[in-house]
Amino acid sequence: MFSKLKLITGNANKPLAEEVARFAGIPLADIELFKFSNDESFVKINDNVRGADVFVIQPTSYPVNDSLMDLLIIIDALKRASAQRINCVIPYYAYARSDKKDQPRVPITAKLVADLITIAGAHRVITVDLHAEQIQGFFNIPVDHLFTIPIFARYFKSTFKLEDTVVVSPDSGGANRARALAKRLECNLAIGDKRRTGNNDSAECLNIIGDVAGKTAILFDDIIDTGGSLIKVSRELVNRGASKIFAACSHGILSGAAVQNLEKSPIEKLFITNTIQLSEKAQKCDKVVQLSIAEMLAIAIKKIHIEESISILFR
């Protein structure tokens, strides 16, 4: 068992790290993280971490490459400062959508990122709602994969009348995820038949498989980036007679014109977690409601530190 537990954060999502620290009852370690004029990053850890069990809270969110590089440099600094174990808490794992070679001469960047984190010196990764669960196998170190479904399920049960509700997966790839939420909410499942013709927004919803007429639809996905495909599915739900449409996503990237498009869409509310820090524009949007994963991460950190099971988090 480790004697010292330390929490450290980079710049990617300090509000989440501060909330995790409050739930865990452990202050964040003192760290200097800045850029030189030539854009090189520099880290100095001011607290003693020798022999400590260190948890680095750093999603690889926008700016993605800066956040990833900061994480790697923090890992290296901890390794050279003789930390006993380095645990990377990565609520949002970037490049997860590049998880396979589905075209000629393209990279599998999710695997490359896993290699970089491992080679830098990480001993464990704790992450949330990977885009593809097989990414766990890209690491040769332990990976604790946490899920936001229990958080969403508890919220919807306490807020919604679920008698005429249907959970909708925007495409067949997310059907298992949506089915798991529908099972917890004890409601039906529908699936969007979507054809993607390019990057991000270039998707066409051809059909909705399942009965949505007269029902409250909850569109459920892991990532909302530009929001193009999600909004197209929401419009098809309107055409199919859905009475109300909500959306829920683990990771609210909300890039480009996503917020403006959301405001004009039939979606009444978008529920997202705080794996990614919201932009000012998203914070001002009345349709965006953020749920916190801080307590879940704090419990996971304390359980892992004392070498106990984290299965309580999946109930």
Image (cartoon, grey):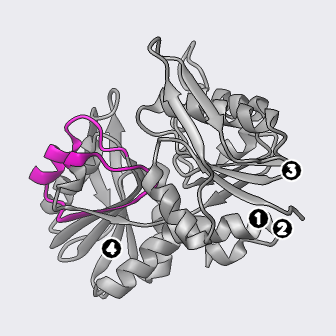
141 lies above or below 305: above
Dot 2, how many residues are within 10 Å of its Cα: few (below 14), some (14-19), or many (20+)? few
Mark 2 in CB contact with mark 1 (< 8 angstroms): yes
Dot 1, how many residues are within 10 Å of its Cα: few (below 14), some (14-19), or many (20+)? some
In this view, the residue farthest toward the left is: 264
216 lies above or below 128: below
Magenta-tinted stretch: 253-281
Residue mark closest to the camera, 3 vs 4: 3
Q: CA distance from mark 2 to mark 1?
A: 5 Å
Give the number of callouts.
Answer: 4
What kind of element bears circle 4? strand
Q: Can see residue 239?
A: yes
Residue, disc 4: 166
Which numbered marker is on residue 304?
1
Who comes first in sequence, dot 3 or dot 2?
3
Q: Which amino acid type corresponds to the residue marked 3 in the rendered image?
A: Gly
Who comes first in sequence, dot 3 or dot 4?
3
Residue, disc 3: 51
**Percent position of residue 139, x then y:** 75, 40
Q: CA distance from mark 2 to mark 4?
A: 39 Å
**Percent position of residue 20, x then y:** 54, 64
Residue mark closest to the camera, 1 vs 3: 3
Who comes first in sequence, dot 1 or dot 3?
3
Q: CA distance from mark 4 to mark 1?
A: 36 Å
> Is 261 contained in the magenta span?
yes
Residue at the (73%, 31%) spot, across then down: 76
Mark 3 in CB contact with mark 2 (< 8 angstroms): no
Mark 3 in CB contact with mark 4 (< 8 angstroms): no
Residue mark closest to the camera, 4 vs 1: 1
